[in-house]
Image (cartoon, grey):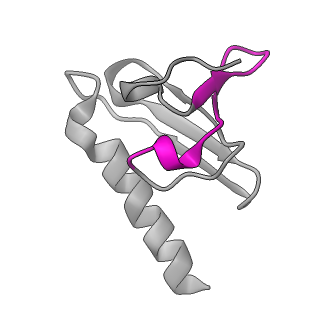
Amino acid sequence: MPIGERGYWAGSGWTLGGFNLVMDPSAYSFPVSGGTIWWDGSAGTRYFIDSSQGIITVIMAQVSPSRGGGFREDFTRLLDAALIERR
């Protein structure tokens, strides 16, 4: 079920468990695979489960405000670049 069409929720939907689901990867401002399940928590925590790449990412930050100035997105970009380089 789609969440929204703009901003933070663009390209996302809900899973039956209530987690975010990547429905349109091109709507994201950082690299992410379609079908990835993710969640943002309080104070900058986030996790991704990307079954297409076999990756689970857990970020346990304590940042206020919780959006963290984009560090989680930067972390995802750096992780993606490192994985591409390794292949």
Q: Which residue is drawn at the image coordinates 54% and 78% (left, top)?
A: 84
- Residue 38 % position (x, y): 59, 33
Q: Is 12 situated above or below 26?
A: above
Number of callouts: 0
Residue 5 or residue 76, whichever sits in front = 5
Q: Which residue is drawn at the image coordinates 39% and 27% (left, top)?
A: 8
Q: Is 50 situated above or below 81?
A: above
Location of the N terminus (image quadrant) = top right
Q: Is residue 57 left or right of residue 81?
A: right
Direction front: furthest residue: 5
- Residue 2 % position (x, y): 64, 20
Q: Which residue is drawn at the image coordinates 42% and 30% (left, top)?
A: 45
Magenta region: 12-29
Residue 60 or residue 36, whichever sits in front = 36
Q: Which residue is drawn at the image coordinates 40% and 60% (left, top)?
A: 77
Residue 65 picture quarter: top left
Location of the C terminus (image quadrant) = bottom right
Residue 47 picture quarter: top right
- Residue 11 % position (x, y): 55, 34
Q: Is residue 50 magenta?
A: no
